[in-house]
Amino acid sequence: MNPFSFFCVGRIALSQSGLANTVILNTLFLLFCSLLPCGFTACSKEKMDEMVSSVKQQAQTVTEQAKAIAASPALAEIVPATGRSEVQLPTPLSTNAAYFRLYSFEDGRPGVVQFTSYDPEKGPNAYPALLVRANTVATSVSAVAGQTLMGRVFLQAASGSPVLMTPEGALVDVDIAPLNPEIKTINASIGSVTLYDAKGQASTASGIIVEGVQP
Amino acid sequence: MRRIQLGFAIFAMFSTIAIGNPTVQDPTKPLATHNTVPGAAELAKAVYEASMAAEKYVVDCEQAVAKKGGVAIQAKMLAKWKATVNQGIREAERLQIMGEPAAVDILLRNHDLTVRLNYLYVAHNTTPAGQVVGRKALMQFQRQAAAKQKECEKVSAMAALQPEVAEAAADKLSMELDTLVHFVGLQERGPYLPPYYAARAAADAVMTKKRIATARQKFQEAIQANLPDPVALTSWANAAASQLKSTGKATVEGQGDVAGPQVLEELIRRWGVGHGGLQRVQGLRWALRWHSTGSNGYEDSGSVNGDDPTYSEAIAWTDTVLAAMAGLIGADAESIQPAKVAVHHQQYLKQTASMARMGDARKVQTKGNEALAVLLAKNSVYETNVKTYDAATKDLITFQTRWLKDAVSNIPQDFPNADGVVRDRSRAIGSMAGLYAEDPNAPMQATLFHPAHKTMMAIAPKLVGPKVGTSDVLRISPTSKTSAVKFMGRTYATVLAVTIPEPDLQSIKLNLLVDESHPPLSISTAKAIDSVLLGHYSAIGGTIVSAQIEAMITRFVTMSDGMAIVVPRGTVTGSSTDHSMLNQMAVRIDIDPSWVQHDLGIYRIPGK
């Protein structure tokens, strides 16, 4: 597993839990306000303790609720999960969108996992265009997650610029991160990889990360 | 008939020659004939042999004269070969009417020999012995003048009713005249010639017209026999489609009732026969053009036909075939059981992939996909599979195709375009024979300016060895050892078929999700797999190891249906000249490949 990918997966997770914390704090503030009138009147210590304990309980419930909300699809829609990709070339390339597709077949042939930086419905016509492609016998996302597959990488930095790719037959490890219920993307990383253009000129990427959105 | 008999008589005099075309290995091989007019091949062979024998005499004699001077020449032999060469020129002119490009070569050979024989006559006639021969020849003219006058008049009189007999007699007279006349001075011989010329002209006038009529008839017959009939094809396909629609089978001649894919196979076969026919028609029309451009010097020969009808016929033929293909698949789709959709679809894919390879790929793919979509709709589970397969493979193909485009644009540096290399290396330089004019701005037409064997001897050493690259390589048949490269300008090529090693093959199949029991499910992947397995390459690079020159007309008139893959389906080769094509040549090169480019990558042959 590439440590770089851990970092990225972590970063996305952090930003999501940050949002959940904001929700919790807001809820606590409202609860505190509801307690205010008591502060201006004479309340018994017992009453106070009871109220504090109740607030604590409510806060706990709210925290749990917020956690649940954070993981729920409804919140994921609020959080724009477009995916992203990064290719660590001497001049790094990145996109703010990435896609994950698993194609499997009824007729028993092996399936394919494809991570793309472009919308697969539209094809590699948005640049930089990155395709990470690996065969797999898995037929579900959960079966693919956490696996290391053997695949190929194709990259075109801009329209008309040379296509770089891993050579036919020289497969590279594609590490797919385990499923994380807190994030919507399926994440893959590739360690150091050498890509060749049609002139045979090599470019080495120290790492590739794709966080692809599922359909 | 007498003409052919005379040809055979000459033929019997000399040893047989190998017929073919001048090659690097054997530059002296004469140009092949197409024999559209019966008898042309035998006549060409006989005249070639006579011409070669004459050349041998001339070479030997020139060497003897170089050593000993004119005294080394025997008058009788000199006269015999002079008469042979002139008879060869007459025969070649007849071959020209028969549309045989070999005629041009024979004329060039014999005109060259004429010049050299004239030098030998000068060397001989200026010796004391030669002067005696001259005086005797003049006396013979005087002695037989009256008798010959009568004989010549008789020939002239015969010409209208018995032209063949008159021509044979005129030939005999011409050869007799040749054995005497060149020993006698121009002024002294003058009075004796008119009767001969009159007989010659009378016989030729009738026979030339007759030959032209025969040749035109034979060419028209051959054109009619080879021209494909789109209307007939459409009605055949419509009948088969309506059978498929109602019963799921159609009757194919010689095969009985067969399913849709077998009917499509028959359509593809007919497409190929028609395409081959169109190439032959193109060659036949080029040969006929000689009769209609006035370039033959016969005033009554009609007007120039500026258009190239074969172009539009070729487009129409392929359009008809593609419409028929869509009709057949559509008809099959109407009656097919859902369980059979996958099997039929996969067979159709293989077939449409091979059709796309041979012709206008885009048109075939568009038409094919439209037709196949109807079939797919009959089995939704399989249809989903096919759509998923397409989605899972199309980006890979897009990237590979773009990578290859870059690769190909880098190739010309090391492997320059084959046609350009051949042109540069077969250009005439000064007095050195060549196929292309020395002026690089002259039209890029390989033309026979010098005898074919001399041209080949001059260019052969330059043609072998250079690295060249070329596009569109098709295996002639799945079992053939060679692939053919389509015509580029006036060059085409054959390449030894290359086998891609198993590991490479496996990784390509892996990429395309294909194995023994899982065939490709889209036209483009089926085409890619075909490209790798059958040796259909989009480009190759390698070294020229051999070459041969051949006449364009003969190449096309004798084009086999299999070899016709050198021209993409739906097109014909243009002539790019408004004049007679008789002297227009093609160069075939044999390439030892260093690398091949299939649909998904480039395979470099180890050690090359």
Image: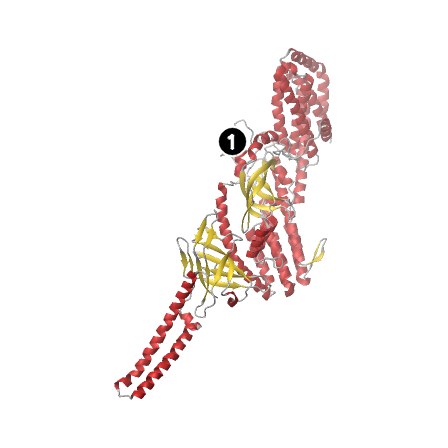
Q: Is residue B548 shown left or right of residue A26?
A: right
Q: Position of residue B482 (x, y in %)?
A: 62, 44
Q: Is residue A163 visible?
A: yes
Query: The N terminus of chain B lies in which quarter of the figure?
Result: top right
Q: Is residue B235 visible?
A: no
Q: Residue at x 61, y 21 (%)?
A: B116
Q: Which residue is mark 1?
A: B438
Q: Quadrant of residue B560?
A: top right
Query: The C terminus of chain B lies in which quarter of the figure?
Result: top right
Q: Is residue A37 shown left or right of residue B558?
A: left
B133, B400: nearer the viewer: B400
Q: Is residue B285 shown left or right of residue A58?
A: right
Q: Residue at x 71, y 14 (%)?
A: B143
Q: What colour scheme has been applied to the protein in the rendered image?
A: secondary structure
What is the crowding at mark 1: few (fewer than 14 residues within 10 Å), some, or many (at least 20)? some
Chain for disc number 1 = B
Q: Position of residue B63 (x, y in %)?
A: 63, 19
Seen in the picture, residue B221 relative to A87 is either above or below; the reply is: above
Q: Position of residue B13 (x, y in %)?
A: 72, 26
Q: Position of residue A112 (x, y in %)?
A: 53, 61
B358, B545: nearer the viewer: B545
Seen in the picture, residue B346 relative to A13 is either above or below; the reply is: above
B230, A36: nearer the viewer: A36
Instruction: Give the secondary structure at mark 1.
Output: loop
The total number of labels drawn is 1
Task: Tell me the amino acid under the disc marked 1.
Answer: Glu
Seen in the picture, residue B181 relative to B234 is either above or below; the reply is: above
